[in-house]
C-alpha cells in the first residue's frame, strides 16, 4: 500500500500548510490577472476607437445610422458574454485537500488522472483508491495527522467546518 504522508522529510502539517498557501496564491493571482486583462482590453478598445474617430476613419456617433450601431453594440455584448463564459468555465473544477481533489458536491477524484475515487477500506479512517492508477491508495488525513473518514472529509469540504466540530456532534 502506497501512502502519501511525508514528502522530502517534512511533517504532514507543514506539507498541508504549504499546499494551502500554494492553492490560495494561485486563486488570487488568477483573479488579478483576469481583472487586469479585462481592464487592459477595455482601455485598449477605447484608445483605438478614439484614434479612429480623430483620424476620420469612423464617423462620430451622432453621424451614424442607429441600426448598424445597434448591431455593433449587440455584437460587442455577445463577444464579451462569450469571453466571460469561457473564463468562468476554465476555472478549476476541483479543490485539493487531504491529498485528494474534491468537487463542490464532496466527491473525491484522483489527484493524478482526475477520475472518481472509490473507498476500499475503513479501518482507522478511509482509504481511497483510483481504479485506473496503480498504487494510488490514499489514506485521508487531517492537517494534524489524524486519520479521517470520507463522510467527515465531505462535511469539511462542503460546509467548511473543522474536524473537531464534526467529532463533537
Image (tube, helix red, strand yellow):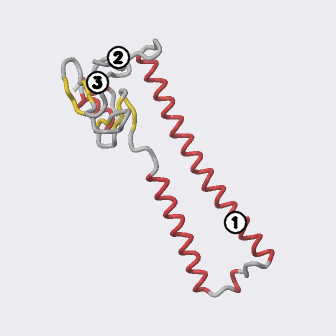
Q: Is residue 133 above or below residue 3?
A: below
Q: Nearer the viewer, mark 3 or mark 2?
A: 3
Q: Can you tell which mark lies on residue 46?
A: 1
Dot 3 or dot 2, earlier in sequence: 3
Residue 60 visible in rendering: yes
- Distance of label 1 from label 2 (alpha carbons): 55 Å
Q: Residue furthest right?
A: 55
Label 1: few (<14), some or many (≥20) within 10 Å?
A: few
Dot 1 or dot 2, earlier in sequence: 1
Asked if residue 10 lies left or right of residue 159, the reply is: right
Dot 1 or dot 3, earlier in sequence: 1
Asked if residue 22 lies left or right of residue 57, the reply is: left
Q: Residue at x 26, y 29 (%)?
A: 129
Q: Nearer the viewer, mark 1 or mark 3?
A: 3
Q: Nearer the viewer, residue 161 or 31?
A: 31
Label 2: few (<14), some or many (≥20) within 10 Å?
A: few
- Distance of label 1 from label 3 (alpha carbons): 55 Å
Residue 32 lies, in percent from the top left, at 58, 45
- SS of the residue at dot 3? loop
- SS of the residue at dot 2? loop
Q: Residue furthest top?
A: 9
What residue is shown with label 3?
A: 137
What residue is shown with label 2?
A: 145
The C terminus is located in which quarter?
top left
Amino acid at each position: 500500500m502506497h501512502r502519501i504522508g511525508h514528502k522530502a522529510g517534512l511533517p504532514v502539517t507543514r506539507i498541508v500548510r504549504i499546499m494551502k498557501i500554494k492553492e490560495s496564491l494561485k486563486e488570487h493571482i488568477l483573479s488579478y490577472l483576469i481583472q487586469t486583462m479585462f481592464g487592459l482590453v477595455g482601455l485598449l478598445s477605447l484608445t483605438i476607437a478614439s484614434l479612429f474617430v480623430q483620424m476620420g476613419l469612423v464617423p462620430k456617433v451622432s453621424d451614424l445610422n442607429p441600426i448598424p450601431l445597434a448591431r455593433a453594440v449587440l455584437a460587442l455584448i455577445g463577444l464579451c458574454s462569450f469571453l466571460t463564459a469561457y473564463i468562468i468555465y476554465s476555472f478549476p473544477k476541483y479543490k485539493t485537500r487531504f491529498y485528494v481533489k474534491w468537487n463542490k458536491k464532496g466527491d473525491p477524484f484522483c489527484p493524478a488522472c482526475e477520475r472518481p475515487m472509490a473507498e476500499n477500506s475503513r479501518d482507522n479512517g478511509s482509504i481511497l483508491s483510483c481504479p485506473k492508477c496503480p498504487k494510488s491508495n490514499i489514506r485521508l488525513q487531517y492537517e494534524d495527522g489524524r486519520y479521517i473518514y470520507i463522510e467527515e472529509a465531505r462535511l469539511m469540504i462542503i460546509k467548511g467546518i473543522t474536524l473537531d466540530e464534526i467529532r463533537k456532534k
